Image (spheres, grey):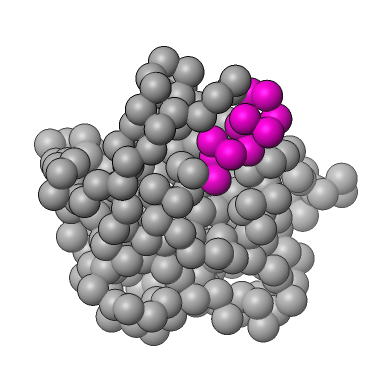
Amino acid sequence: MRVLLTGANGQLGRCFQDRLPADWQILATDSAELDITVLAQVTATVSAFKPDAIVNAAAYTAVDKAESEVELAERINAAGPANLADVVAQHGIRLVHVSTDYVFDGNASTPYTEASPTNPLSVYGITKLAGERAVSAAAPDAIIVRTAWVFSEYGNNFVKTMLRLGKDRDALSIVDEQRGCPTYAGDLAQAIIALLQQNAAGGIYHYSGDKEVSWFEFAQAIFAVAVQKAVLSKAPTLTPITTAQYPTPAHRPTYSTLAGNKIKALGITLSDWQSALRKTL
């Protein structure tokens, strides 16, 4: 299989390249090599490489910054995927587009399914949902994978932030009322590869971690492993706080656990994030 990968230098992009099957060929691009917001660039790259599939791991993911950079977030998260979908529809290419749990408002009390109503609270969530809709409209056979709370050994993420703060501070206050499922980017990459290998039906799939926690509980797990692995000599004292005590420019869903039954029915297991956390550290 010939795969065109966008967002190659991000967490998912790096992990996807690490796990690429030996008999696959890849053209790994980041925004410097391929600006997905420019249709002519997408068309030229696809015409030259002739991929069997495109995996769109490119995204504007600075959730709070998006509140003041609306136009840029719209271009990358909505217009870019629309360009990719238009081109794959013309050439009969599979598209896997990665989306987010932030398309939901967090008012649910049970895990969100692929059919659950969307109602994003932030510019980031709104633009990601717009990207989903553009992809579905132009390329109904495209696969859209919603994921959540992604971490890995690459890039910037909550795990790395906690480790950095833990080295410098004796005490940290962590939000305890937002709940979701951490997802290891390597497991997400493997799931996307499996979807392509199975030639899975188009539509939306939820893929995330296999155990729900709050950010506070996730931080507890991170520091427990960090001390066990001697990454840190001791863990800082953690204090649970409310969202109101830690205001941010963007509103985040209080509850964003994703139900993964649809993808599990294909024999694809959810991310064992606790095991992945130990390996990552």
- The reply to whether the magenta stretch includes residue 222 is yes
Seen as rendered, the residue at the extreme top is: 168
- Relative placement, left or right, of 184 versus 34 is right
Of the pair 108 and 66, the residue shown nearer to us? 108
Residue at image x 30%, y 37%?
173
- Relative placement, left or right, of 34 versus 243 is right
- The reply to whether the magenta stretch includes residue 267 is no
Q: Position of residue 113 (x, y in %)?
A: 43, 80
How many callouts does the rendering have? 0
Residue at image x 82%, y 49%?
21
Magenta range = 221-231
Q: Position of residue 62 (x, y in %)?
A: 30, 38
Q: In this orientation, does residue 200 appear?
A: yes
Residue at image x 32%, y 41%?
239
Q: Is residue 37 above or below residue 180?
A: above
Residue at image x 48%, y 64%?
212
Seen as rendered, the residue at the extreme right is: 23
Q: Position of residue 88 (x, y in %)?
A: 52, 60
Q: Position of residue 198 (x, y in %)?
A: 74, 72
Quadrant (top left/top right/bottom left/bottom right) for the N terminus: bottom right
Of the pair 200 and 181, the residue shown nearer to us? 181
Q: Is residue 174 above or below residue 194?
A: above
Most common SS among magenta residues: helix
Quadrant (top left/top right/bottom left/bottom right) for the C terminus: top right
Of the pair 176 and 91, the residue shown nearer to us? 176
- Relative placement, left or right, of 107 versus 18 is left
Q: In this orientation, does residue 8 appear?
A: no
Place residue 148 in its image quadrant: bottom left
- Relative placement, left or right, of 139 versus 250 is right
